[in-house]
Image (tube, rainbow, N blue to C red):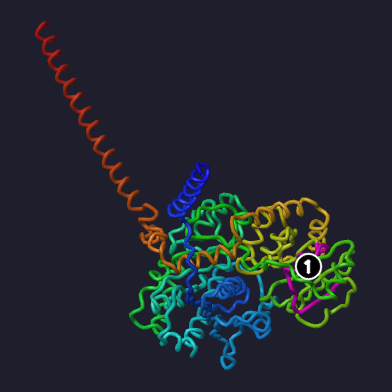
């Protein structure tokens, strides 16, 4: 009887302790799985930009959220057939009547040239693209209908790039929003977030500087940072404000104020590649978010071609925007001559059915499953243009690279790869047979490039959570709204002269100058008094001497 009683008491103690432990458990994660209404606004016409955002948008729909996406890239019929997402709604900006080019195979290499005014040209190109997207997209009938609708959303996702005109939706729907950058943070964005952008060691991505920068680079970087910020503030935003006011109404706040309301900025970079820099807690790196979770099998003909590449193979692609077939004849002839003479096979993204000269060791395709090709064990080198999506995939795989930057952030991305010793950078404008042959020889035969690429790959992959999981968490976190009042930096609200302590420096200089002046006057007065006392004592001594005489 005593044993039964003791056993019963023991069971009660265990049950009570478990209950108390459960009741008093500390919860740091909001596990509530509420259904969210999410609006994605992506008005830029570049497919490579949208390819970064698409995996997140589709994943949010898979998790039961209602996702409405405004873009030039609605889900294709094949994608819908493969994976129907009933809660993913496209608002397509594609309008055959307008004929706006959606940024696929649009860059004519014959039109590309080096110029002494390259930075003015870059700014002008960004401005022209912003004009097209703002004037065309915001005046689309579907956008007008959305603005006039009585829709309700919990959070808005939008791209941070070359215009703020789409931020009118933040004012229209009065909800928190996240900004996404498909590249290194734009110089003006750091201002809006209150994020550090010290030009002494953080290169802006318009120059392609190697880290650490030398003295001349730091001068250029500092002046360039100031000029790019000024151009965006007083040129871009002034134009965007007029367009946005026409579409959203005259009561629309200043776009800069709306930009400063961003609850978080998710950036498609990673410190392993671009280097460590101070970031606010709500500036989050999600580089590689577009990389799929599994490797798909290649088509049969590609597999057979690569399986027989016993000496290794080269993968050559200039991305989705650049049209390889527009390459100048002298450069194309140099490439063809080199490829035909190497003992290795080449997979080449080429937009027509055939090359000018047929080569047994070269296979071309108008489109290629890039990540799957890179993962074939016989691919030993990637030759590309320095686009961030391709570079990120090559870094993930651990593939050495040869990069020929042509425009935009490609110079910055390529410099980062070279800085890590994982690739070689060629000047496209100076490309010739000799330079390409030398680069290919180094990429295939210098083991240091592969070793550095493999080392970089390990660092790039080693994270507390996948880029996609991180982006999903931040989207749901901002939509819940618990941390939004506390996530923003107070530095984003400070005028430039306060942020850089110009007012403090001026006051301290004035105080120090006044102090030095007062000290100087006191010393001068003291010397005068000492001189007077000494003179008086001398006069008295002279009088005494005369009396004695």
373 is within the stretch colored magenta: yes
**Residue 448: where, in percent of width, then height?**
77, 50
**In this picture, is 524 found above or below 90?**
above
Q: Is residue 405 visible?
A: no
**In the foreground, 527 or 225:** 225
Q: Which residues are the magenta region? A: 362-379
Image quadrant holding the C terminus, namely top left
Q: Residue furthest top?
A: 548
Residue annotated with mark 1:
315
User: On the picture, is 352 further left or further right than 84?
Assistant: right
**Residue 85: where, in percent of width, then height?**
60, 80
Q: Name the image quarter holding residue 398.
A: bottom right
The residue positioned 62% from the left and 54% from the top of the image is 272
Q: Secondary structure at mark 1?
A: strand
**Residue 182: where, in percent of width, then height?**
58, 68
Q: Is residue 362 visible?
A: yes
């Amino acid at each position: 009887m005593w044993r039964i009683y003791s056993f019963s008491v023991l069971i009660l103690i265990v049950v009570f302790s478990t209950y108390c432990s459960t009741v008093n458990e500390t919860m740091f994660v909001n596990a509530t799985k509420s259904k969210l209404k999410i609006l994605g606004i992506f008005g830029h016409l570049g497919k490579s930009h949208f390819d970064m955002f698409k995996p997140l948008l589709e994943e949010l729909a898979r998790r039961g959220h209602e996702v409405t996406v405004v873009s030039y890239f609605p889900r294709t019929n094949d994608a819908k057939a493969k994976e129907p997402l009933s809660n993913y709604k496209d608002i397509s900006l594609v309008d055959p009547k307008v004929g706006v080019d959606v940024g696929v195979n649009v860059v004519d290499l014959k039109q590309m040239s080096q110029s002494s005014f390259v930075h003015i040209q870059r700014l002008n190109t960004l401005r022209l693209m912003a004009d097209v997207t703002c004037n065309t997209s915001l005046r689309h009938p579907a956008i007008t209908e959305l603005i006039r609708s009585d829709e309700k959303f919990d959070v808005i996702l939008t791209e941070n790039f070359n215009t703020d005109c789409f931020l009118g939706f933040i004012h229209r729907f009065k909800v928190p929003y996240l900004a996404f950058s498909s590249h290194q943070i734009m110089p003006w964005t750091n201002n809006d977030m209150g994020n550090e952008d010290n030009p002494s060691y953080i290169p802006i991505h318009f120059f392609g500087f190697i880290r650490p920068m030398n003295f001349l680079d730091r001068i250029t970087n500092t002046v360039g940072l100031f000029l790019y910020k000024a151009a965006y503030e007083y040129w871009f935003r002034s134009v965007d404000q007029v367009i946005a006011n026409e579409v959203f109404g005259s009561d629309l706040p200043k776009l800069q104020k709306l930009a400063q309301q961003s609850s978080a900025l998710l950036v498609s970079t990673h410190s392993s590649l671009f280097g460590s820099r101070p970031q606010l807690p709500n500036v989050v790196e999600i580089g590689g978010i577009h990389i799929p979770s599994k490797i798909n099998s290649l088509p049969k003909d590609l597999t057979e071609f690569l399986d027989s590449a016993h000496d290794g193979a080269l993968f050559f692609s200039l991305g989705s925007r650049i049209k390889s077939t527009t390459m100048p004849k002298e450069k194309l002839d140099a490439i063809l001559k080199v490829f035909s003479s190497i003992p290795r096979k080449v997979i080449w993204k080429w937009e027509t059915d055939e090359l000018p000269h047929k080569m047994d060791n070269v296979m071309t395709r108008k489109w290629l499953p890039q990540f799957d090709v890179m993962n074939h064990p016989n691919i030993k080198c990637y030759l590309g243009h320095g686009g961030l999506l391709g570079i990120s995939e090559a870094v993930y795989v651990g593939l050495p690279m040869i990069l020929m930057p042509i425009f935009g952030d490609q110079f910055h991305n390529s410099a980062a790869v070279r800085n890590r010793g994982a690739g070689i950078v060629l000047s496209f404008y100076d490309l010739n047979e000799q330079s390409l042959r030398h680069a290919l020889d180094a990429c295939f035969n210098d083991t240091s490039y592969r070793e550095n690429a493999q080392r970089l790959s390990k660092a790039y992959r080693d994270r507390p959570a996948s880029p996609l999981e991180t982006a999903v968490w931040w989207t749901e976190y901002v939509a819940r709204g618990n941390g939004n009042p506390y996530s923003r930096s107070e530095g984003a609200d400070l005028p430039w002269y306060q942020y850089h302590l110009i007012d403090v420096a001026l006051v301290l200089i004035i105080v120090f100058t006044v102090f030095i002046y007062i000290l100087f006057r006191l010393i001068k007065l003291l010397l005068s008094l000492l001189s007077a006392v000494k003179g008086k004592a001398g006069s008295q001594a002279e009088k005494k001497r005369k009396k004695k005489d």
